[in-house]
Image (cartoon, rainbow, N blue to C red):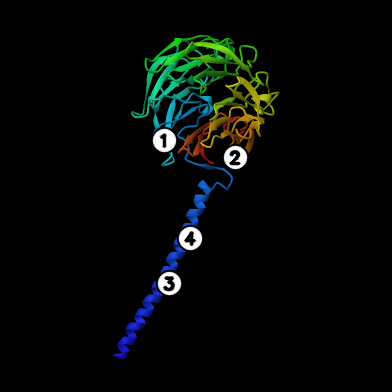
Amino acid sequence: MFKKLFAIVTVLVLFISTFVAIKKDINKEIKEESLKDQQYRNIVVDKSRKSIFIPTANMNMKRYSHSSVLLPNGKVLIIGGDGAGSKSNNSAELYDPKTQTFSYTGNLNFGESPFFNPSSAILLPSGKVVILHSYYVEIYDPVLSKFYPAGHLYMKRRDYGAALMPDGRILIAGGRTFEQYNKGYGTALSSAEIYNPYTKISTLTGSLNLPRFANTAITLKNQKVLIVGGQDSGDKQTKSELYDLKSGEFSIAAEMLASRYSFTTTLLSDGRVLVAGGIEPTYNYNHRTKKRTNSLGGLYAEIYDPRTNKFIKTGDMTTPRTGHSTLLLPNNKVLIVGGNKIGVVSTAEIYNPKTNKFMPTGSMHYRVSDLQASLINNVNVLVTGGIDYNYDGPEGHTKDSDKAELYIP
């Protein structure tokens, strides 16, 4: 009896010892996995660390000077642009943040010459996307994943500014005539038109007071549209204009502190407008060093205040830029990324409207200009495509990109 009891106790002791050892191993593994998960979470959301760029999937096509639009379903539509060898790219693809992959979603009906302004893509209140070419217009339906023709502009124009107005129509202002690039730069236009996506008809509206191309158009919170920058056929335009939707007329507004084109305008959460970077119309380009000079606008930034109708100086950017991309973040700061000024750059910076200062914020893995940035998941930023004008390798003197990265604030 005693021997049997001893044997049972021995077995129980061995079982308990084994169980304790296994439990320790399991706890160790759980702890290690927890640490790994915590390290991963730190990479993604830790607010104490420096913001970073991380690579995501490559696009299906190389492209620069393209358009990107965040759709209501959370996916990002990538449209057109120029591709390898500066050839027009009429394909489109979707980025899915959940799978972090790109997939084709049809082709544009109308291609563009790389020497004409890239297609402008504007999200409509319906969730569809209007794509404005130099003459033809088409609409993308995200439900059907299809592009279909949607009329044309009143007149051919390129390098114009376009903005969605509060009533759902689109204002198209300025630009230049359609002469071939190698036969001249075309004539600056003062005409403007309004495209109605519901009737698919574009009609003339009041004219700009000053002809201009390479300008921007941005709808303000007071429902007027601000026309900024650009140049006419032989001179710069520093005077801005305001379009009144009710009267259908343009009026001269404030004068910028620096003339510029190939710049960006960003509507801030407080209703002001950040004007950043760009090229002065009188810039010089050195083909040997591949650098631009005599271009104050690339470093200079200013703010337009609609309440005072004035441009005021703000802090200078940390890096001179043109061909960069800007995006208003959920924290009301502005991300400025990439570009080409004194050489193509991979750096990024943040503008803080409260302090009026720019601060560096990490770098991309690739230096690119003429890229696009789109907000995803209301947190991170998807950066796509671009071109390296300073590349000097087997592909030639430029290198188009199919790369994409995620900026983690």
| Residue shown at the point (61%, 34%) measured from the top left | 354
Query: Which residue is at the front of the view, 370 or 191?
Result: 191
Q: How many other residues sit within 10 Å of disc 3, few (<14), some (14-19) or many (≥20)?
A: few
In-image side of 190 versus 203 (left or right) = right
Q: Secondary structure at mark 4?
A: helix
Gap between marks 4 and 3 measured at Cα: 16 Å
Question: Looking at this view, is 43 or 249 the one in front?
Answer: 249
Question: Quarter of the image containing the C terminus?
Answer: top right
Q: Amino acid at mark 4?
A: Glu
Q: Tell me the number on the disc at residue 74.
A: 1
| Disc 2/disc 3 C-alpha distance (Å) | 47 Å
Is the Cβ of the residue at disc 4 closer than 8 Å to that at disc 2? Answer: no
Q: Judge whether 99 appears above or below 62 on screen.
A: below
Q: Point out the residue furthest to the bottom here.
A: 2
Mark 4–mark 2 Cα distance, whole angstroms, equals 31 Å
| Circle 1: element type | loop
The secondary structure type at the circle numbered 2 is strand
Kind of residue indicated by mark 2: Ser
In this figure, which residue is indicated by the disc labeled 4?
Answer: 32
How many other residues sit within 10 Å of disc 4, few (<14), some (14-19) or many (≥20)?
A: few
Which is nearer the N-term, disc 1 or disc 4? 4
Question: Alpha-carbon neighbours of circle 2 within 10 Å: few (<14), some, or many (≥20)?
Answer: some
Q: Residue at x 47, y 32 (%)?
A: 61
* Mark number, residue 21: 3
Residue 116 visible in rendering: no
